[in-house]
Image (cartoon, rainbow, N blue to C red):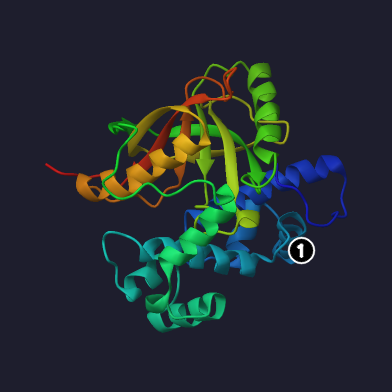
Amino acid sequence: MVETAAAPDFSDLARVDYVVRVNAVVDHVLTHLDSRLQLEDLARVARFSPFHFHRIFRSIMGETLADFVKRARLERAVVLLSSPERLSLTTIAMRCGFASSSAFSTAFSARYGVPPRRFDLAGHRAEHRAALTGGRIDRLPTGSNPDRFSAALRDIPQRRIAYLRALRPYSTDAVTTQTERMTEWARNHGVVDAEWLGIQWDDPEVVALEDCRYDVAVVVPARLRIDGGVSETILPEMRVAEVAIHGDVELELRAIDWLYRTWLPRSGYLPAELPAMEAWNGAPSAEADGTYRLRVVLPLQLGGGAS
């Protein structure tokens, strides 16, 4: 569950409901960054009055709605700058919800100190990766596959998921805490043996660790009642590339490197504007030796791919 930056002025019961509603707004923003995101429309998503929604959002998220939207758009832009499509600044600006390439460049320069085309993307990623790993894990070079990874393609229908969101997932024990809570909820609702996902909304090589979000999610039937402070959303139909691993976090990071740096450029596919995920084999848990079994999942644009 989202933690508060400052104690809000409402009861614990109300706070649980407010967090679910704010999560719905965050999900909407992240999947509609190319659209106009008006306060009144987002308040409607949260089922709050526009007169109060801004303060409620800030009390839950620790930043204003406007600041969150701008940050999310610029972080998406950083990702698109490295796209194999070699997108123009105008295209990136449009996909991230800026009115023009000049407006995008101005906002980008204000946040990162340089215009988009002068941005040191490799240096930015290296700095964030060092913060994530403590500098212990070297990046797997392009074309290298010492672990003999292989990618499988899979088409997945639309799914309804129930989830709890962890903030600062890579620098705190929030994922462990939320996984325990979500597992108990799933057991009580008879879905503990369903498909489990870890949804990585933010790339920790682009987004500051304190701003990252991660959802511990389970696929649920259409009619199941969602309660207990758990949020829900719909994942659209998607084609994915999956890499199965059995190991630790270092192996997972190498699999991600291989998938993005070696497999994807040669595949003929382009990544979809959907978050990367972990798909667990059963409920999320480590084995006795601390390793785990899961699939690293990369959503792809439908209709693409080599013939």
- Tell me the quarter of the picture where residue 228 sits: top right
Residue at image x 78%, y 52%? 4
Which residue is denoted by mark 1 in the rendering?
A: 55
Q: Is residue 33 visible?
A: no
Q: Is residue 95 visible?
A: yes
Residue at image x 34%, y 43%? 258
Quarter of the picture holding the C terminus: top left
Q: Position of residue 17 (x, y in %)?
A: 74, 42
**Apparent side of residue 95 relative to residue 23 in the rendered image (left or right):** left
Front residue of this view, candidates 139 and 303: 139
Front residue of this view, candidates 292 and 27: 292
In this rendering, the answer to whether 29 lies above or below 192 is below
Quarter of the picture holding the N terminus: top right
* Secondary structure found at label 1: helix
Dot 1 alpha-carbon crowd within 10 angstroms: few under 14, some 14 to 19, many 20 or more: some
In this rendering, the answer to whether 8 lies above or below 295 is below
Going by the numbered disc 1, the residue's amino acid type is Arg
In this rendering, the answer to whether 181 lies above or below 91 is above
**Apparent side of residue 262 relative to residue 171 in the rendered image (left or right):** left
Residue at image x 54%, y 40%? 233
